[in-house]
Amino acid sequence: MFKKENQKYNLISYTNEEEMTLKEVLLDKLNFSVRSLSRMKREKSVLVNGVYKKPSLKVSRGDLIEVKIDEEKANFKPQDLNLQIVHDDFDIIMVNKPPFMVVHPTKSHYDNTIANGISYYIEKHKENVKIRFVNRLDMNTSGLVIIAKNAYAHHTLSTAMSENKVEKTYITVVNGIIEEDEGTINEPIYRPEEDSIKRVIDERGQASVTHYKVVERLNDATVLEVKLETGRTHQIRVHMAHIGHGIIGDELYGYIDENLINRQALHAYSLEFEQPRTKEILKFKTDIPKDMQELMSKLR
């Protein structure tokens, strides 16, 4: 079990509960990656009762296992972007991303990204952490983004994401009236060409499952709460277009009317998952952005 009082930015403390090898504890109980294990052996960063031990050796019940997780500093240009920080602890930072902001620098967006803003934030708080994104949102999608502060947290949460242990809920406004109060779209999503941005429904694609529930029916539009069982690129956008109810403002798949909204009406408003170290359930919810609230008002 973890000892909360020993939690620090650069140390994971765990009291062993059964006899097994140290390697088994690190991989199965603490969710470290095999790659991390190699680094620990090289740097001798794992202590058992204060003494370095090789991962192949046995540990006993009650042994205190401590793992150092020192990180390099983030290498993005720090910029004060007045980001809305929803949560900050020794493993993660949660940001409410505004629309029109890219998550990390690209050739066409080399600054004013979430990564730049977070670099400024961690520098201001004098932390020495590396930025790793657990989830990403399209530039024109707003909402909650998780940033891991160390490789351990990133690996643990990425694994939880792939195993559908992170509950992701979105709010969106789609074109047309959806008659049924709720439904599930289970259609594979495929990238037809390597350099293609657009995705399509195709049996060659990855399994993709989207659950939706009607929140409100408007004037030829529907507000939906959407939960993802998988996390494919453009999943909600592709699935809603597939059933004939494209997201309002979505230039690639949806319904465009610049008098209504100038971006896709899609907001990642809720996330629920286990804190990587303490295992407590973290729940986050954000308000619906102003432009989406105005869109709903126009359509009522």
Image (cartoon, rainbow, N blue to C red):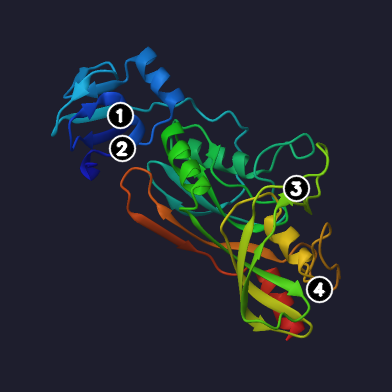
Give the residue at x 73% y 36%. 106
Question: Quick one: SS at disc 1?
Answer: helix
Picture layout, residue 232 above or below residue 79: below
Q: Quadrant of the N terminus?
A: top left
Calculate the distance from the C-alpha at mark 4 to the C-alpha at mark 1: 55 Å
Residue contact at pointers 3 and 1, CB within 8 angstroms = no
Local packing at callout 3 (Cα closer than 10 Å; few below 14, some 14-19, many 20+) is some
Does dot 2 land on a helix, a strand or a loop? helix
Q: Amino acid at mark 3?
A: Tyr
Residue 93 spot, x, y in % from top left: 47, 47
Q: Earlier in the sequence, mark 4 or mark 3?
A: 3
Q: Which residue is mark 4?
A: 260
Quadrant holding the C terminus: bottom right
Which amino acid is tagged 4? Leu
Alpha carbons under labels 3 and 1: distance apart: 37 Å
**Which of pointers 1 and 2 lies earlier in the amino acid sequence?**
1
For the residue marked with disc 2, what is the amino acid? Lys
Query: For residue 220, what is the image quadrant?
Result: bottom right
Residue at the image point whose x is 77% and y is 62% from the top = 263
> At which x and y percent is residue 116?
62, 39
Q: Which residue is mark 2?
A: 29
Q: CA distance from mark 1 to mark 2?
A: 7 Å
Tag 4, which secondary structure?
loop
Q: Earlier in the sequence, mark 2 or mark 3?
A: 2
For marks 4 and 2, the one nearer the N-term is: 2
- Residue 58: name its quadrant: top left
Mark 4 or mark 1, which is nearer to you? 1
The residue nearer to you, when weighing 156 against 190, is: 190
Q: Distance between the Cα atoms at labels 4 and 3?
A: 30 Å
**Circle on res. 190:** 3
